[in-house]
Image (cartoon, helix red, strand yellow):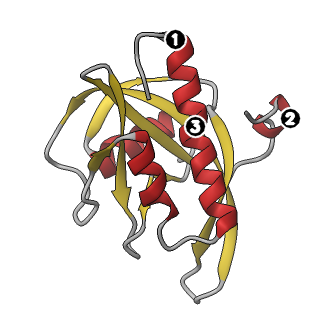
């Protein structure tokens, strides 16, 4: 789990770790990037927005989901992004846990929002990523599962 110090780092982006409980198990909703990789709905913080409101907005825009979002980050993780000029850069992302309460059928085009079990989500998030970023995404899923199990021990990952 990230330390309190990790949460105090300046962040470049925010992400919504969207989950639901189905048949006693947790599922996570991931979306595709423009490059075809799976990821959490994420983006920038607009002027005047709090980070968790920005994450909630990204979840609606990219995954078509609404729900209750935590106001403290679940994790802070590195994310590699390709700049328009082709350079690779590393961004710092604060992830917020969002319990999905409703879904619409109008997410951004080509995002392909899809539900996955925790293990499937870790596999999808690892595709086309270097080991450093594979581990970072896996840690976010593991921390979400730990937090959810503490909140409701009847739910299994």
Q: Position of residue 150 (x, y in %)?
A: 56, 13
Q: CA distance from mark 3 to mark 2?
A: 19 Å
Q: Earlier in the sequence, mark 1 or mark 2?
A: 2
Q: Are marks 3 and 1 in contact (CB under 8 Å)?
A: no
Tag 3 residue: 142
Seen at 54% across and 53% down, the residue is 44
Foreground tag (1 vs 2): 1
| 80 to the left or right of 155 | right
Q: CA distance from mark 1 to mark 2?
A: 23 Å
Is residue 41 visible from the viewing direction of this image? no
Q: Position of residue 81 (x, y in %)?
A: 58, 71
On residue 36, the disc is none
On residue 5, the disc is 2
Dot 1: element: helix
Dot 2: element: helix
In the rendered image, the vertical position of residue 11 relative to residue 26, given as above or below: below
- Image quarter hosting the C terminus: top left
Dot 3: element: helix
Q: Position of residue 88 (x, y in %)?
A: 65, 80
Q: CA distance from mark 3 to mark 1?
A: 14 Å
Q: Are marks 1 and 2 in contact (CB under 8 Å)?
A: no
Q: Position of residue 126 (x, y in %)?
A: 51, 62
Q: Earlier in the sequence, mark 3 or mark 1?
A: 3
In this view, the residue farthest toward the bottom is 85
Seen at 37% across and 72% down, the residue is 36
- Image quarter hosting the N terminus: top right
Q: Are marks 3 and 2 in contact (CB under 8 Å)?
A: no
Q: Residues within 10 Å of mark 1 (few under 14, many from 20)?
A: few
| 78 to the left or right of 107 | right
Foreground tag (3 vs 2): 3
Tag 1 residue: 151
């Amino acid at each position: 789990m990230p330390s309190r110090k990790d949460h105090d780092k300046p962040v470049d982006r925010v992400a919504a770790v969207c989950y639901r409980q189905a048949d006693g198990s947790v599922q996570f909703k991931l979306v595709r990037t423009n490059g075809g990789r799976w990821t959490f709905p994420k983006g920038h913080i607009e002027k005047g927005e709090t980070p968790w409101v920005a994450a909630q907005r990204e979840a609606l825009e990219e995954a078509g989901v609404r729900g209750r979002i935590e106001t403290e980050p679940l994790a802070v993780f590195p994310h590699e992004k390709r700049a328009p000029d082709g350079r690779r850069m590393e961004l710092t992302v604060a992830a917020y846990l969002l319990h999905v309460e409703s879904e619409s059928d109008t997410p951004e085009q080509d995002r392909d929002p899809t539900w996955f079990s925790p293990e499937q989500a870790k596999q999808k998030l690892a595709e086309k990523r270097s080991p450093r970023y594979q581990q970072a995404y896996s840690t976010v899923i593991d921390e979400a599962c730990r937090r959810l199990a503490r909140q409701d021990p009847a739910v299994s990952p």
